[in-house]
Amino acid sequence: MFLAFLVIWIYALNSGNKLVSPVPERVYNYLAQMLLAFTLLYIYTYYAQYLTIWYGNIPDETDRVFGMMFGDYAFIWWAVLALKFVIPFASLCFPATRHHVSAIIAVASCIITGTILERFVWIAGVNGTGSYPIVAAIVVCGVVALAGFLLVRGFMQSRSLIKG
């Protein structure tokens, strides 16, 4: 998610002419290649964890996973898989997409959205059911994003990387 956020952050600063020296377009291709690599790493660790839980057949763990897959938050759980693996992989495996800045931004947005939804499912859908309000999850994510934004902006201003 950090890399996806970095891609959007650089794009926003570049398009707003806020950087002291603009980032060349070729850098987006490098970042897209890294997004693809981390997408593959994510699905590898995800699948390895799933196999460990499946073959271990520990009732507490398998009940939790099946609850998330088929419970009240099943749509969100499957959407996370699509947003964090299917869409990034299907898009970024082609060189044409990796050289198109708008496509890279769209994929980065999918990864960020998938990560936020994944955190929500982890908290709200511990047993596949629950009434944890999504508004609370959005507020918590907003507070964390604002804190990160202020810290990064302060760092970039102190190092004279951005104007103003």
Image (spheres, rainbow, N blue to C red):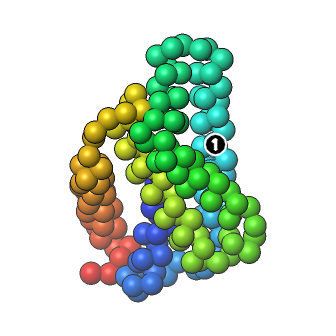
In the depicted view, which residue is nearer to us: 158 or 37? 37
Does residue 52 appear to the left or right of 138 in the view shown? Answer: right
Residue indicated by mark 1: 43
Badge 1: residue crowd in 10 Å (few <14, some 14–19, many ≥20): some
- As shown in the figure, which amino acid type bears the numbered disc 1? Ile
Q: Under tag 1, what secondary structure?
A: helix
Looking at the image, is 27 positioned above or below residue 5? below
Task: Say if residue 21 shows up in the picture.
Answer: no
Place residue 119 in its image quadrant. top left
User: Measured from the top left, where is residue 162 in percent x and y?
Assistant: 35, 76
Q: Quadrant of residue 153?
A: bottom left
Q: Is residue 102 visible?
A: yes
Tell me which corner region of the image, top left, top right, bottom left or bottom right, holds residue 157. bottom left
Q: Above or below — where is 120 with respect to 100?
A: above
Q: Is residue 15 left or right of residue 104?
A: left
- Quadrant for the C terminus, please: bottom left
The vertical placement of 21 against 48, above or below, is below
**Toward the viewer: 61 or 146?**
61
Q: Residue at x 70, y 60 (%)?
A: 90
Q: Residue 18's spot in the image, x, y percent?
A: 37, 82
Residue under the image location 49 percent in, 64 percent down: 109
Is 94 drawn above or below residue 119 in the view shown?
below
Residue occupying image coordinates x 68% and y 70%: 98
Looking at the picture, how far across and down is residue 33, in whole percent?
67, 61
Viewer-nearest residue: 71 or 102:
71
Residue 151, position as x, y percentages in the image: 28, 59
